[in-house]
Image (cartoon, coloured by chain):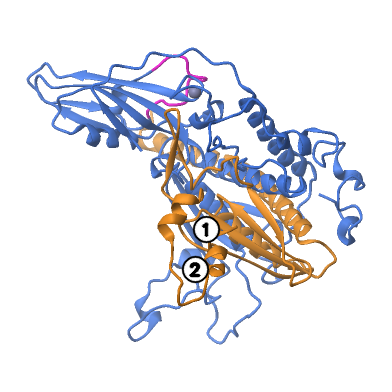
Chain colours: A blue, B orange
Amino acid sequence: MSRSQPHHSPAPSRPHPPPSDAHRSLCANTSAIRSTVKHLRDQTVSLAKPRSRSTRMDPYDVEGGAINVRFLHADSVRAHFIIQNFNLETANALRRVMLAEIPTMAIDVVEVMDNTSVLADEFVCHRLGLIPLIAKGVEDLLYSRDCDCEGYCEQCAVVLTLNAKCTGRDIMKVFARDLVVSAGRPNEDVGNPVIVDPERQGSSIVKLRKGQAIHMRCIAKKGIAKEHAKWAPSAAIGFEYDPANKLHHLDYWYEDDPKEEWPVDHDRINLDGGAPTEDEAFNYDAVPSRFFFDVETVGGLDPDQIVAEGIKTLQRKLAGVIQQLQGGGDGADGADFGGAQSPTLNGGYGAAPDQGYTTPYGGNASVWGGANAAAGGTTPYGATPYGGGPSW
Amino acid sequence: MNAPDRWLRDGSATSWQPPIAQLIEDNPNARQRYRMRGNHLVRHSVYSNRNEEKIEVKEDTRVPSTTIFTFNKEDHTLGNLISQRLHKYPYILFSAYKVPHPLFAMFELRVTTDGSITPREAVTKCCADVVRDLDVLQQSFTTEWLGKRIVTEGEAERQARDQNPN
Ligand SMILES: [Zn+2]
């Protein structure tokens, strides 16, 4: 949410606080989750051989049974692709994570020094919040709530200053390009306004007539769209499976005849194994295995980065579940699986970080930290009936 | 104790009243509530806090090999993913999830196995398998994306050349 704080003087910039114990334990936990993901990655082959609908050779599925991607279109704003031999629950989880849980940048707090434009302070603040900012390199920033500073600092925020006054006779338009990014960012990309139009102007913010001025300090923070949609990396994600409705997951509404009244996407149906024949018997065992994704970016991340980050975020989430369940339940309590974390209700980080952060994962007792589960003996699964297989 | 359990346990159906306002006040999972730390607004529904377990594990005492996992600050993304994925393993007898109340950012996952493996191990293995699937997906995606970008750019170049040959 953007808050306007009318006619405040700018906050004095604060020195870097040293990383606290809380910060370190957070980092330890995050890196433990990363190493979990890495560990799983090292275990090579996929166990998942999703039940394919049929064994006949599919001309579009050259990989034959393995999860694979086929692109229909790729450019700087859009990734249109098919995931084949996948399953609905994972495809949908990926879609939801790309929509709501990828960290990006957006203006979150605005200090209004001057605003004599025709738009009210909160109106302008809201517009500022929605301006797309470059999210490349957000991983170098902390979430503000995890930072030890009061309010914001260079480790958890990027400050953009907007200062414009119209002195000429013509109406002056203020654009995102007029936002001046503060020095001291962790890298040169995070927090820059997204500018993709040929005139290099960016989003328009306000118009000023002669004598009107606007002066605002915008504090951009890292966040996810689950908290506010301004942090969404994607403008839209198209998602479809079974375009011919062979699985009958859809029950078309119709007046007389659904075949007459509903449009048919022949291209997609052809990409999905063709139209069903008239007298084809319904296959009760059929499950969807081919998923059409159309990811369009707002500009902060490239479309392929959105997908890559989505996969990574989902993997971290799952690795967090694994860690916690392995740690016997007293593990990283309070840790957000994406690496996000908020402080305690009653007064922030104590001097002693939770013991749970270090014990289950850092020590040599850890399945993840120890000398690799490949030997099988170290995991709790070594003795279980399925432990004979690759003990992940 | 989870809020819905508390409602059920307090009294009969006739005297039942939904003490929603009070529960939202008490329950850190309640939606749309911010709390302050310094100047930071922290939204309860999205971000975990250290006073609660991310996952609470409770054995069901009435049915063997059954566990109820309560995931705090998680939603259908994980709930559906895990519960559906579990159906594919032969040793799973039951697996389903529910979000007991939309204002509480949590879901409950109930898992019953045939006893050859504990529900906790089953969920762990399931998650590990998904992580590995996603790795395969990631690799294929990266390769295909690069290939397609080269093709797209080549086409654009050729079109530009065709339009103004010099
Ligand atoms: Zn800070």
C-beta proximity under 8 Å, tags 2 and 1: yes
Q: Nearer the viewer, residue A385 or B119?
A: B119
Which residue: 7% across, 20% down? Answer: A169
Tag 1 or tag 2, which sits nearer the N-term?
2
Write down the quadrant of residue B68 in the picture.
bottom right
Residue span colored magenta:
A182-193
The residue positioned 63% from the left and 80% from the top of the image is: A284
| Label placed on residue A292 | 1
Circle 1 chain = A
Compared to residue A229, the image places residue A116 above or below, namely above
Q: Amino acid at mark 1?
A: Phe
Residue B37 visible here: yes
Q: Is residue B5 left or right of residue A204?
A: right
Judge whether residue A59 can be spotted in this image: no
Is residue A192 found inside the magenta-colored segment of the image?
A: yes
Tell me what residue is drawn at x 52 percent, y 66 percent: B7
Q: Residues within 10 Å of mark 1 (few under 14, many from 20)?
A: many
The one of A254 and B71 positioned closer to us in this rendering: B71
Q: Quadrant of residue A8?
A: top left
Q: CA distance from mark 2 to mark 1?
A: 9 Å
Residue depicted at 59% across the width and 41% down the height: A338
Quarter of the figure with residue A55: bottom right
Relative vertical location of residue A299 with respect to residue A381 in this rendering, above or below: above
* Near-viewer residue (A160 or A23): A23
Residue position marked by numbered label 2 in the rendering: A243
Q: At label 2, which amino acid type do we have?
A: Pro
